[in-house]
Structures are given as C-alpha cells and as structure tokens.
Image: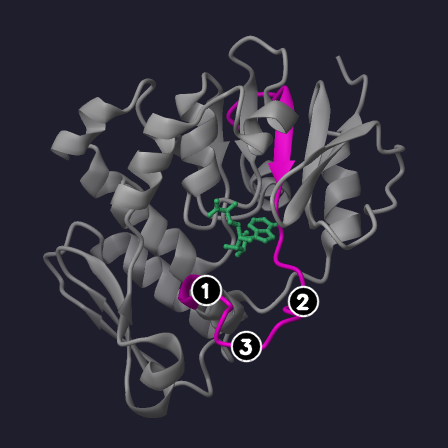
Amino acid sequence: MLSFIIEKDSVFASVAEKMQSLIEEKYPSVLKDSDALLTVSDDVTLSFHDDSSKVLGSSFSIDILNDEILWRLRHSGRSSEPVCKAVIGKLENPVVFDATAGLGRESLILQNSGAKVHMFERNPIIYLMLFASLHKSKSADKLTLLKNSLPVLSPYGSVLEVKKNSELPCVPDVIYYDPMFPQRKKSALVKREMRIFHELVGFDEDTVETANELLKICKHHLVVKRPSNEAPLELNVKRSSFIDGKACRFDCYYVKND
Ligand SMILES: C[S@@+](CC[C@H](N)C(=O)[O-])C[C@H]1O[C@@H](n2cnc3c(N)ncnc32)[C@H](O)[C@@H]1O
C-alpha cells in the first residue's frame, strides 16, 4: 500500500495534497500490492520497503536534468534523435504538446532542439515528481547547459482533460504521444525505471481513442511511439510516414487542421 508524508512547509505541499486526494478518489489501487512511501519535503521521493524494494529498488525520484540526459543533449540533437526527426522534421520552432510527459526526457530533447514544448501528465505521482523536478531545475546551475531552457508543465491532467476543464495554453503544431504499452518482457533486463512505471501506471488502454482525439487538436501532425515489432495504430487518419528508433518506431499521422 502507498502512504504519504507531506511536510507542511514544503513548497510542493499544496500540489502534493491535491495529488493525494486525486489518488484516493481516482486511483485507490495504485501501489496497493507494494510497500511504498511518498515523502514530500525539499524533494519528492517514492521509497519502497521489504519485498517491493527487491524488485523496484529502495527509492525513486525524477531528475529531469540528470547526467545521462545531459550527456545525450550534448552528443545528439535535431538531426540524429529519431524523436526530433519525427516530431520537428523540417518545422521551424514548432509548438509541441508532449501528451505523455513521464520523466520529461523526450520533452527536454525536443525543447533543446528548438521546439516549444508543453507537457501533459495524468498520473498524479509522476505529475508531482515532474513538477518538483522542474521547480528545482529552474534554480540549478545545470540549467545553463540547456539551449532553450525547460519545457512547460501544464496543469495536471491529459490534453483532453485540460481542454475540457479549462483551456489549452495554445494550439499545437505537433502532438507527441508515447503511452505505456503492455510489458512483454518480465526479465531483469527491463530497466528499473520501466518496472516502476509499470507498477505506477500499468498500461494505457485508451490509446486508439486518445490518439483519434489528439488528431483533431494538432495543426500539422501527430506522432505515436510504438514498439518496433508492433503494427501501427489504426486511426481515423492513415499513417503518412515513420522514423525508426532503436527498439521503437515513431509513426507520423499528418492532418490539415489549420
Ligand atoms: C511511456 S511513459 C512516457 C515517457 C516519456 N516519453 C519520457 O521521455 O520520459 C508514458 C507516460 O504518459 C502518461 N500517460 C499515458 N497516457 C496519458 C494521457 N492520455 N494523458 C496524459 N498522460 C498520459 C503515463 O502516466 C506515463 O507517465
């Protein structure tokens, strides 16, 4: 089961309390079979105990400016990153919605390659951790290593929820959609981060409906990330092209919504 410790004077306390209520209302079974504690103080950390820690490690938090991603930003870019080729292509500084922000890695890569990225996330724990990481990164020395500063995190929720409940920040040129697909490999080779994501998020069962709705919102195209060995999603618009990544593929669906 998941427990919370929220320090009252933490700068993240009010967002954390909202997320805690959301979890209790909408996701009561999240981490039900694990022994997990979410601590909100200067940082937001999820720690695992007993048997859960053997599978998931002892603790987890998001650091959007971690060394691995900073190395990747230094050594690759718009012309070599498959996600940039699929999302940005030949567009000049497109406005991009990352509909599935997760750890924020691909948002950061896209932003650093010239896109103006707005991130959306519907898992309350991931949202809170990403919120905290972005907040801390704004005053980190490492920020100067970025070409175009940080992507912007939208209010909590999916693109479709934010559109329904308030207003989208703008009309995006491109939407990037990277949902969780069922985990095929159960082995230790599955990265720890992915195992934690599968515990927290499970897999997204609404991919086709969501992708069809996202197609109506973007001006230029939608990109859907898929495992390389899986067929493209069959959407209301035909797939126009794709870019091959290492173990995945980026399927592009062009629209004419402007
Ligand atoms: C595979 S991860 C994305 C990883 C991300 N591309 C990165 O670079 O870290 C999928 C994430 O999207 C979130 N998600 C899935 N469907 C969503 C939706 N319709 N709206 C908002 N978030 C969604 C999940 O909660 C999960 O955090």
Q: Where is residue 217 in the image (x, y as percent from the top left)?
A: 70, 28
Identify the residue under disc 2. Answer: 182
Cα gap from disc 3 to disc 1, whole angstroms: 9 Å
**Which of the two discs, 2 and 3, labels the residue nearer the N terminus?**
2
The three-letter amino acid code for the residue at tag 2 is Pro
Q: In the image, which residues are magenta?
A: 168-193
The answer to which of 212 and 141 lies nearer the viewer is 141
Q: Would residue 252 be seen by someone viewing this image from the given angle?
A: yes
User: Which circle marks residue 200 in the picture?
Assistant: none
Q: Quadrant of the C terminus?
A: top right
Identify the residue under disc 3. Answer: 187
Cα gap from disc 2 to disc 3, whole angstroms: 14 Å
**Compared with residue 103, is residue 20 higher up or lower down, i.e. above or below?**
below
Q: Would residue 139 be seen by someone viewing this image from the given angle?
A: no
Cα gap from disc 1 to disc 2, whole angstroms: 15 Å
**Compared with residue 103, is residue 76 higher up or lower down, i.e. above or below?**
above
Q: Where is residue 186 in the image (x, y as percent from the top left)?
A: 58, 77
